[in-house]
Image: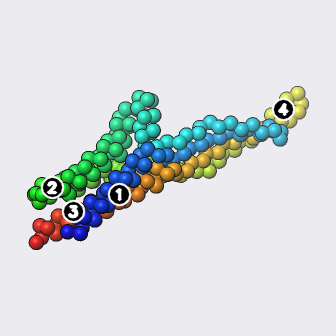
Amino acid sequence: MYKKHLGFAFNIIALGLFFPGILLTMFSFNMEMAANLSGSALTSSLIDKELSIMATISELWKDQRLLVAALIFAFSVCIPLVKTVLLCFGYFTKSLQVEKRLINFVSAIGKWSMADVFVIAIFLAIMSTNHADTTTSEQFSVFGFKVAIDISTQTLSAAGEGFYYFTAYCVLSLIGTQFASSAIKSKYAT
């Protein structure tokens, strides 16, 4: 019986982590370009973004990338919420048969909610560009004077708070579902 309570507790804690996970900054991305002309430097920020999961969905929707926005929304927002609601309903139901069906259904859609982990993997791939520097040096002559110009770009990315909340949500949700599923199997074994 304790497994059922632990499963419920883990899922409620996971739900508490879910909302900051989708609303807070998942990652920040900054790209700067610098030009150094004979000792004088000019720096300009090309990209400076902080995105959460919901901000990413909104930006994709505005850019008319509707399928990608819908998939991220479905797999990172809708399925986790449905899963948690069903697990809570299963926890409070008196019918062992209904509870078993709900837990089995949640386990089945849990495979689909592994897309949460996929989203995290995408953000990690984006973050792998951290400190990617490129430099191009050119020399040209103007009225007999040689002028050297160095053009460089630097890409910086970092995980935001939302990344850690969402990762914790994914892990605790999987643990909670495992405990709930184990509790059902124990009930049916007796």
Task: Say left or right for 28 vs 181.
Answer: right
State the SS at label 1: helix
Q: Quadrant of residue 150?
A: top right
Task: Say left or right for 91 vs 98.
Answer: right
Residue drawn at the location 65% of the way across and 47% of the way down: 133
Q: Quadrant of residue 3?
A: bottom left
Task: Say left or right for 165 vs 140.
Answer: left
Residue nearest the observer in this picture, 1 or 36: 1
Tell me where residue 87 appears, x and y as whole percent. 23, 54
Task: For the residues labelled 2 and 3, say whether their Cβ atoms are less than 8 Å apart.
Answer: no
Label 4 – label 1 distance at C-alpha: 66 Å
State the SS at label 3: helix
Residue drawn at the location 86% of the way across and 35% of the way down: 146
Q: Amino acid at mark 1?
A: Ile
Residue 93, label in figure: 2
Q: Amino acid at mark 4?
A: Ser
State the SS at label 2: loop
Label 2 – label 3 distance at C-alpha: 15 Å
N-term mark: 2 or 3: 2
Q: How busy is the neighbourhood of tag 1: few (under 14 within 10 Å), some, or many (20 plus)?
A: some
Tell me where residue 190 appears, x and y as whole percent. 10, 72
Which residue has dot 1 on it?
Answer: 13
Residue drawn at the location 49% of the way across and 42% of the way down: 51
Residue drawn at the location 84% of the way across and 32% of the way down: 141
| Vertical side of 106 occupied by 77: above or below | above
